[in-house]
Structure formats: structure tokens, C-alpha cells
Image (tube, grey):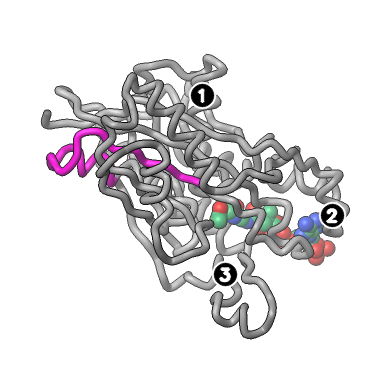
Amino acid sequence: SPYARIEGIGAAIPSRVVDNEEMCTYIDSSDEWIQQRTGIVERRWVAEGETVETLSLDAARQAIERAGLTAADIDAVIISTVSHLVQTPSLAAVVAAKLGCSDAAAFDISAACAGFCYGVGMAESLVRSGAATHVLAIGAETLSEMTDLSDRSTAFLFADGAGAAVVGPSDVPTMGPLVWGSDGDQAEVIEMDRSWPEAVATGETSHITMDGRPVFRWATTFIADAASRTLAAAGLAPEDLDLFVPHQANNRITDAMLRTLKLPDTVKVARTIVNFGNNSAASIGIALNSMIESGEARSGDTCLMIGFGAGLVYAGQVITI
Ligand code: ACO
């Protein structure tokens, strides 16, 4: 087949609910401040027994089943994550084996909060090139393990979870061009504060640090424009869309993008950050899954998704779900 399509979507939500009241026992903040600045009411963190691997497996099994496939049909597995804290083997190789995707190609991608879109875009390319037939693209994070709970500029934002999509062949076009890029000149605005060897040497752990203002500025200007360019690259106008699913970084960023995009009220907008927090590479898969399960999104809907985050990196694409 010359084209690719989304065959199934799945998600895994960790079981531990951390509300803003609990958050305020870690940092000097308030429920009102967190809601006003981000929209977050509560976030999910992994509980005992839940890991980036178990979340990946759960999201993947759901996506494969909804695609009407079995694990043996998957011939490539991609996991986008920054939470798999060993260099090798890749999380994808381990997860592929546990799923039963025997002899599938497997590799991880490091694209932070753009991870889901990088993974799906890569999956589409592999299917279209003939390198693979059914590709499983997972975005999975346990950012709670990399967050400094005493840091009031990050602790309230970050969360855990996994989203997954199976991408397979199609006779008709269902996915627009990938609009993506990076700006490593802004690498330091979201970064790990030390390498793991440094952490070992100092007896510390490595945490994510963020300078929120430049991230906010970049997201509300350059990324909002990238979202517009993604729509135009697909040859679509705002009224052609059914769904807008940006990375769930923070509701004020989503609001700013909506002002740039000028989407009609009929377009449904993802707001899963309110209950699940910012779970990085997992956020778009989780949002799509939630909107499908609630009936807000339907099979055949046209969706603009855009991921953006540490690197800085971004990727946008219009997909039919
Ligand atoms: N609770 C209460 N008050 C706080 C907190 C807190 N946690 N943190 C800061 N404040 C106070 C400050 O002390 C300051 O008070 P002052 O005006 O009296 O000096 C005031 O709030 C404003 O502080 P800023 O740091 O300027 O806060 P800002 O308005 O920039 O909001 C935020 C912070 C929400 C992080 C914002 O910068 C933002 O949304 N940035 C984008 C971050 C983002 O979305 N990152 C995710 C994308 S990348 C990824 O997903 C990995």
C-alpha cells in the first residue's frame, strides 16, 4: 500500500492520584495558583509495581487489540521516552519481547514531549517505505521519578503515563506531512540538571529543570505558528478539523494556540492535563484515547496534533483516527 493510517490507539494511566492539596505539601504553592497557571487539578504518578515498562505494555496491548491485530502482526516497535534510565538495551526491545512481537525491529526515540508525534511520524514513514507493515509507536514516561519534589517551578507540572498507536498500510491518504524541527540553541531551558555519572559521584539523583518563561514564549509563538503550518501543509483549513490535540503542557499554552489557529467552536480540544498532568511523550496518545473513550472523538475524525518540548524539539501532523 502506498499510504499509512492509524489502526488503533491505547493508553495506560497510573493509579496514584496526586491532587493539588497533596502537591502543596511538597512545594510552597496553592490549588488556585496551579489551576490558574496550568489548568491542572490533579495528576497521576506511578504506584508500587507500576513502571515505564508496565505502562508501555498496557497501552500497547490495548492499541494492538483495537487495531484488530495480535502482537505477532507487529513488525516494528518504537518507544519515545526520556524515562528509561539505562542506555541499553532499549525499552522497545524489552517491551517487544514481553508483548510477543517476535523478531520485530525495536528502538527508542529521545524527543521529550514531542515523542508521540516523532514516533507516529517515524511509523508512517516505515510503513510507506515498505520497511514495516504494522508499527507500534508508544510514548511512555515516569517523570515523577525525575522531578525534584522541592522545586516549585516543575513539581506541580510533571506526571506519568503511556499512550500507544498502531500504524499500518492504507490505500488512501489519511496522514498529512510531518512538520518538525529542533532548536538546540535553547537546549538549557528544559534539561536534566546533571549526567548520571555526575549524580553517582555526588550521591545525588538527576532531575529535570525548567525555565518556564522562555518555554511558554516559544510554545505560544513559534509552536502556535508551527501548528498553523502543519494544517496548511495538509491542505486543510481550520473548519476541516474535528479535533485539536496539542501536547498537554499547560492549558494557557493551548489557549494561546487556539487564538493563533482561530479554530471554529465545532473543533474539540484536548484538555486531559486537568486530570492527568503533563506526561510528556504520553500526553497526545492519552488525550486521543480519552476523547475516543468518552465519545468526543470518533473513528474517521480529522485531528491536528502537535508535540513540543525539551531539546527544544517539535513535530506536528494531521491524522485521521
Ligand atoms: N506556586 C505558587 N507560586 C509560584 C510557583 C508555585 N509553584 N512558582 C512560582 N510562583 C510565583 C513566583 O514566585 C512569582 O511570584 P512573584 O510575581 O511574586 O515574584 C510568580 O509566581 C510568577 O512566577 P513565574 O516563574 O514567572 O511563573 P509563570 O507565570 O512563568 O508561570 C509556569 C510558571 C506555569 C511554569 C509558566 O512559565 C509556564 O507555563 N511555562 C511553560 C512550561 C511548560 O508548559 N512546560 C512544559 C513543556 S516542556 C515539557 O513538557 C517537558
Q: Residue 53 has which mark?
A: none
Camera-near label (3 vs 2) is 3
Question: What residue is shown at x 74% (from left), y 38% (from top)?
Answer: 17
Q: Which residues are magenta?
A: 122-140
Q: Which residue is mark 1?
A: 268
Place residue 256 in its image quadrant.
top right
Mark 1 or mark 2: which comes first in sequence? Answer: 2
1 vs 3, front mark: 3
Q: Secondary structure at mark 3?
A: strand
In this rendered view, identify the residue nearer to me: 237 or 83: 83
Residue 192 numbered mark, or none = 3
Q: CA distance from mark 3 to mark 2?
A: 23 Å
Q: Earlier in the sequence, mark 3 or mark 2?
A: 2
Answer yes or no: do the residues labelled 3 and 2 have beta carbons within 8 Å?
no
User: Would residue 139 be counted in the magenta stretch?
Assistant: yes
The residues tagged by marks 1 and 2 sit, at their Cα atoms, a distance apart of 31 Å
Viewport quadrant of the N terminus: top left
- Image location of residue 130, percent across then percent down: 12, 39
Amino acid type, residue under disc 2 in the picture: Ser
Q: Residue at x 53, y 19 (%)?
A: 293
Query: Can residue 228 be seen?
Result: no
Left or right, 4 with reference to 211: left
Indicate the quadrant of ligand 1 in the picture: bottom right
Position of residue 254 relative to residue 287, above or below, is below
Residue 95: percent from the left, percent from the top? Answer: 42, 45
Q: Could you tell me how far apart the alpha carbons at marks 1 and 3 are, in whole angstroms?
A: 34 Å
Q: Please indicate whether residue 170 sits to the left or right of residue 252 in the image.
A: left
Mark 2 Cβ inside 8 Å of ligand 1: yes
